[in-house]
Amino acid sequence: MAEAYDPGNIFAKILRGEIPSHRVYEDDAVVAFMDVMPQGTGHTLVVPKAPSRNMLDADPATLGPLFAVVQKVAVAVKKAFNADGVTLMQFNEPASGQTVYHLHVHVIPRFEDVPLKPHSGQMEKPEALAENAGKIRAALAG
Ligand code: 5GP
C-alpha cells in the first residue's frame, strides 16, 4: 500500500512560503524554483501545488498543467544558459532515488561533454541561485 502524503515535506513548506526559495515561475496550479543542490547550472524544479507524493498517486488532472510548465521552463533554461540540451528527471519512491515526497520534475540544462553532478550533492551559494533564477525569469518573460 502506498504511503500517505506528508504535508510537512520540504516542498509543501516552500509552496506555503514557510521556507524561502528562488522562484522563477508561478501560476494557479504550478510553481518552479531553483534546486538548492543543482546537478548542473540552472537546475530547476517544477512542482504542482496539488498534494501528491509522486506520479504514482497524482491526480491525472494535475499532469497536463504540470507538464505544460515543464515545457515552458525547459525552453527557458535552454535559452537562459545557451544550453545544448535539457534533461528532465522525475523519481517515484526511495528505490528510484526520490528524496522529497511531493511530486516534482527536474529540469536541467545540459552542455556537450559536461556530466551531471551527483543527485542531492553540494549546496549552491544563494547568490548563484539568485543570479540563475534571474536569467530564467528573463527568458520566461521572452
Ligand atoms: P528527488 O530526489 O526527490 O527527486 O529530488 C529532490 C530535490 O530537491 C534534490 O535535487 C534536492 O537537491 C532538492 N532539494 C532538497 N531540499 C531542498 C530545499 O530545501 N530547497 C530546494 N529548492 N531544493 C531542495
Image: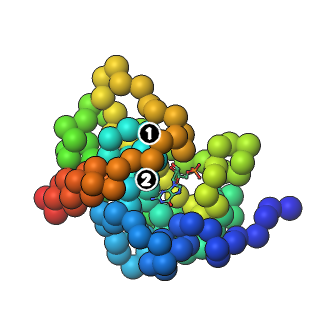
Looking at the image, can residue 25 be seen? yes
Q: Is mark 1 within 8 Å of ligand 1?
A: yes
Label 1: few (<14), some (14–19) or many (≥20) C-alpha neighbours in 10 Å: many
Q: Position of residue 132 (x, y in %)?
A: 26, 51
Q: Position of residue 131 (x, y in %)?
A: 22, 53
Vertical arrangement, residue 10 with respect to residue 83, above or below: below
Query: What's the mark number on residue 19?
Result: none
Disc 2 from disc 1: Cα separation: 8 Å
Q: Position of residue 92 (x, y in %)?
A: 66, 51
The kind of residue tagged 1 is Gln
Vertical arrangement, residue 123 with respect to residue 16, above or below: above
Q: Quadrant of the N terminus?
A: bottom right
Asked where in the image residue 95 lies, by quadrant, the reply is: top right
Task: Name the residue at 47% across, 64% down.
Answer: 47
Q: How is the image coloured?
A: rainbow
The kind of residue tagged 2 is Asp
* Tag 2 and tag 1, C-beta contact below 8 Å: yes
Task: Name the residue at 63% across, 52% down.
Answer: 99
The secondary element bearing badge 2 is classed as loop
The secondary element bearing badge 1 is classed as loop
Residue beneath disc 1: 39
Task: Name the residue at 70% across, 70% down.
Answer: 5
Task: Name the residue at 30% across, 63% down.
Answer: 24
Q: Residue furthest right?
A: 1
Looking at the image, can residue 86 be seen? no
Label 2: few (<14), some (14–19) or many (≥20) C-alpha neighbours in 10 Å: many
Asked where in the image residue 56 lies, by quadrant, the reply is: bottom right
Q: Is mark 2 within 8 Å of ligand 1?
A: yes
Q: Position of residue 9 (x, y in %)?
A: 62, 68
Q: Quadrant of the C terminus?
A: bottom left
Residue beneath disc 2: 35
